[in-house]
Structure formats: C-alpha cells, structure tokens
Amino acid sequence: MRAASKSGSGPLARNGCDFGLSEKRINETLNDPAATERAAEELRRTKRLALSGMMFALALVLSVVEHSFPLPLTVPGVKLGLSNIAVMYALFFLSKSQAYSIAVLKGLFVFVTRGLVAGILSLTGGILSLTVMLIIMVLFRDRASYTAISISGAIAHNMGQFIAVSFIYTGMYLLAYLPVLLVSGVIAGIITAVLLKVIIPAFERLRL
Amino acid sequence: MKLFRKTDILIITLILAVAAAMWYFYRSSVSGRQVRAEIYYYSDLVGTVELVPGQKRTISVPQHENVVLRTDTDGSIRFIRSDCPDKICIRTGRIYLAGQSAACLPNGIIVKVVPADGWKEGDPDIVIGSSGEQ
C-alpha cells in the first residue's frame, strides 16, 4: 500500500513500482551491505503484504462469484467454498497468520454485505477449515497432497457451518446430514484442489 | 507437495464408505416411524403439525406471513412460498423422515421432522445445538 502511495515520486518510480524507497535512500543503501540486506528484507515483506492483499481480494471475488450462481444445494452449510482456494494458497505459500487474517477478513466482508448470521457462518466454517488443514499439514507434511488437505478443509468447512446453523437456529439431527456433508466435502475438496493447482503457476508468473 | 497421491483414493473411498454406511444406518433406523413436523422461528418452537398420510394442509406462522408451508397426502411437508432471496427452503423439497429438516435461514424459519413419540433412548440421536427439548 505504501508502494502505491509513493509511486511516481522519482526517476526510479517510472515503472510505477518503487516499493516505497526514495532515490536518496536507495543511493545510501547501495553503499552499505547491511542496509542492502535490510532493504531486501523490507522488499520481501512488501511483496508478501501485496500478495496477501491480492489473496484477500481473490477470496472476496470467489465468494461473490460463488454466491451469484445458484447450486442445487439445499443443506445448510454445504457449499463449493471456492474462496477456500485463496485461503489455501496463503496457507501453503505465505504464512498461517496471513491465512487466518484472510479467513477473518472474509468473514467480516460477508458480515458487512450479507448480514450477521452469514458472517458468523463464514467465520466459523473458515476458521475450522483452516485449523483442520493446518493440523494435517503439520502432522503429515509432504506426505499429504493438496487434494487430501483440500478435502479435509472442505469437510471441516461444511461441518463448521452446519454446527453453527444448529446453534443459531435450532438443534439439527446430524446423522441425517453427515453423509451429505461428507460427500459434498469430498467433491468440493477435489474441485478446489484442482483449481488451486491451476492458479499456482499464474501467481508464480507474477514474480511476486 | 503433490496435487494427488495414490493414498488419496483410499482416503476418498473410506470417506464415501463411511458416508454410505451412515446413510444406510440412518434410513433403516427411522423409516416407517410415525412423525410430526415442528416449526421453529429461530430457536422457538412456534408450531407442530402431525404428518399423517392423506392430509393436506397449508400452514404459515404469525412471525412471517410470507413463508408458507404445506403438508401433502404422502405424509410429507415442504415450503411452498417464501419471500427470501435464494429460495433454498423451497428447493429443499418435501421432507418426511424423522431427522430431516428444511430451513429458510434468511427468515429464520426451520421445519424439523421428528418422531411422533419423540426421540427415544437408544436412538442414534446426535442432535447438535439442541434447543433443550430433545
């Protein structure tokens, strides 16, 4: 964000991307190895900040896209969960704190646009899903595949939303819906894993 | 990290098998039982309808006149009208087995099918977020 506000401030900013560094500071930095290292670290941080901002934007777009075309899903809590793609990318390639911030911010966005209950459901599903994916990543590391993690995340998301619905409204009979939540979680998980795989090279081409 | 591993097939098969087993267990434990429908406005029980085959009734609750339910001759109940944006409640269709529910979340109205004599001891009664009367 700082990069955007300061871009265009000097000759080095001609390509619109000076990462917030003034010309004077760059000259000072070039003569001092420690400062070069600091500047590089700052650059990495700025890139990560930009990338998580983009992931949040992606999560919102996917959430709106998903909400705008109706699926024949009639069980509370069951959904495709496309925005989980953004959260998963953040979890795999950024950091867990960034993944959690995206999940929380997305919950807030849903709260602002679609109301309190929808916001709570999004938050419950998002946090539970992320926590389960994180646990599996820590436990199995490279032995887990994107698909396996994505499926467990999708199931956790469905269950989280279903449980939240049950608490906000009235008790529901879980056994009648557990099979539906599991099967739809498997399908949604596979779809999001494949889409994530498609998106990864696109983000790598951005050289962020 | 790989997109897909061979063990994933095993995991997916296992999940689907568990789902199928639960579905079978559920269907066999509730089929053929006498049921009634309970209508909730958020967590408050606002109406009960006996689901008896051969009976056709149209129901609405005072909290939301725009939401209309109907019981059908086959002993099922369904939402037939609602002013909510997504109409998920209507698309859910008819429900008739104990444990099934249909929800119009935007209007806060939920219909649950429960056994006429209540859930019994020994029933696989995994009810979460119970409203206190289960």
Image: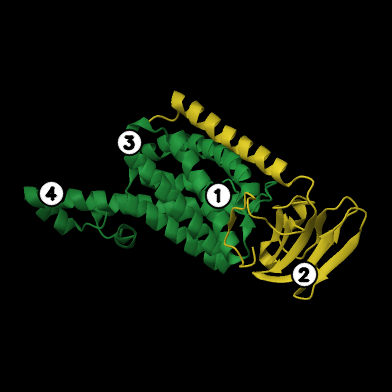
Relative depth, front residue between A21 and A174 = A174
**Label for residue B120?**
none
Which element carries disc 1, helix, strand or loop? helix
Which element carries disc 2, helix, strand or loop? strand
**Label for residue A141?**
3
Q: Mark 1 points at which residue?
A: A158
Instruction: Assign the C terminus of chain A to one quadrant of the image.
Output: top left
Q: Residues within 10 Å of mark 2 (few under 14, many from 20)?
A: some
- Which residue occupies 20% across, 58% down? A22
Q: Mark 3, mark 2: which one is toward the viewer?
A: 2
- Which residue occupies 74% across, 64% down? B38
- Which kind of residue does numbered mark 1 sit on? Asn
- Which kind of residue does numbered mark 3 sit on? Arg
Q: Name the residue under label 2.
A: B47
Figure colour scheme: by chain
Q: Is residue B68 left or right of residue B86?
A: right
